[in-house]
Image (cartoon, rainbow, N blue to C red):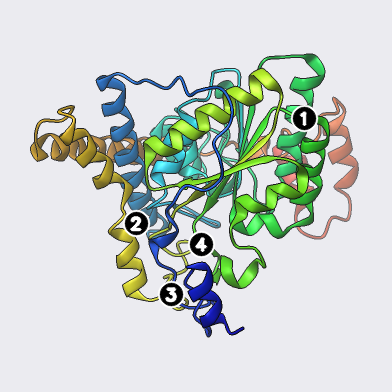
Amino acid sequence: MTQAEQASEDGQAREPGGAAGGHIGPNLLERAGSPVGPESQISLSADRLRELYETMVLIRLFEEETERQYKKAQIGGYCHISSGQEAVAVGALEPLEHDDVLITAYRCHHLALARGVSPESVMAELFGRAEGCAGGRGGSMHLADPTRGYLGGWGIVAGHVPLATGAAFTFAQTDEPHAVLCELGEGAVNEGAWHEALNLAGLYGLPVVYLVENNMYGMGTSVHMASAEPEVWKRAAGFDMHAERVDGQDVEEVMEASDRLLRRAREERRPALLECVTYRFRGHSVADAGTSYRTEEEIEEWKGKDPIPRFGQTLLDRGIFESDEELDEVRERMDARVQEAVEFAENADLPELDSLARHVYGDEHAAEQFTRMAPGSPFGERELVLEKELGNG
């Protein structure tokens, strides 16, 4: 059977040719799998629904400004933005309780903001400033805020999945009524760490929900070209684990499923996989235009499913917002909030050089160890260690 014939049979666009495997349209935005778990208790007030909409707008504007600041060389290293994926972050994280744990992959600005990390703290981290949420040491791919149960973005594909599973194991061992939400991209499900971690979660019955943001592309390769089974939710069957697929452009559908599965994890100690079908409007990273492996027509088709105007229209229809002018006012306020975050980051202090080795070695004799390393060091370590007193923090 040819790829074209297969596409006709299973309803998925898998046209041959190209790294992307052909056109991928939003015909995949359908719920799959039978919902399980305690009934969702999500019932939000009009004020809270407005706040969720504001957060989605904030994330979009924050990401657009992040790209501008990166191109102005204010942000270094890698930088992955999430425009188009706001509904997944806001919807999936809304049911998280204070003592639940969130662990994510490296495309994490939207998740940090949805978890309540301030725009100032996130932008300062992107700028590498001491006031950043990771002290200016992590940057774009390694945001973190343990005070909010956010144990970080992780740069190694699927490398964080065993860590999230380990956190869930701790909750199970100590009989704590909490859950772990582990976010990852669909590209991570082909890594060995994914299979090993989910096998243990299924075997031991751990309170963890694996949130797969399936934005269709791992860098420039489509999920259909990289995965023999591109419907990620089906792959959980190999681990005796419940799984569902939802429309990741519908914030309320994501929220309902996330609430059910997280409550089931807390109350019944059962893991689950939640696949959210979404789309990134920009390239894989700021350095990627995102047009060499997909067409403008495909991108525009997905923009027709933009989660922000979609949710805005829902709130207008319910009378929660009364006019388009109110939606415009939200955008203006959130834009001002982002500009305040940029100003904060620009004026924030750089980390002290003599703190460079802090948190690298926990040994109280770290300073002495660095001093021993100094003689004969070929790249200036001697100067850094002896003149700047590295390790004394």
Among the two numbered marks 4 and 2 on one chain, the one whose residue lies closer to the N terminus: 2
In space, the residues marked 4 and 2 are separated at their CA atoms by 25 Å
Disc 2 vs disc 3: Cβ atoms closer than 8 Å?
Answer: no
Amino acid type shown at disc 3: His
Q: Quadrant of the C terminus?
A: top right
Q: Is disc 3 surrounded by few (<14), some (14 to 19) or many (20+) residues within 10 Å?
A: many
Could you tell whether 277 is left or right of 229 in the image? left
Q: Position of residue 136 (x, y in %)?
A: 55, 39
Among the two numbered marks 1 and 2 on one chain, the one whose residue lies closer to the N terminus: 2
Which one is in front in this view, the residue at disc 4 or the one at disc 2? Answer: 4
Amino acid type shown at disc 4: Met
In space, the residues marked 3 and 4 are separated at their CA atoms by 11 Å
In space, the residues marked 1 and 4 are separated at their CA atoms by 29 Å
Instruction: Identify the residue at horizontal 58%, vertical 30% (top origin).
Output: 261
Q: Nearer the viewer, residue 373 or 72?
A: 72
Residue under label 4, please give it: 216
Q: Nearer the viewer, residue 333 or 7?
A: 7
Residue under label 1, please give it: 205
Among the two numbered marks 3 and 4 on one chain, the one whose residue lies closer to the N terminus: 3
Residue 35: in sight, yes or no?
A: yes
Q: Is disc 1 surrounded by few (<14), some (14 to 19) or many (20+) residues within 10 Å?
A: many
Residue under label 3, please give it: 23
Instruction: Identify the residue at horizontal 56%, vertical 40% (top origin).
Output: 34
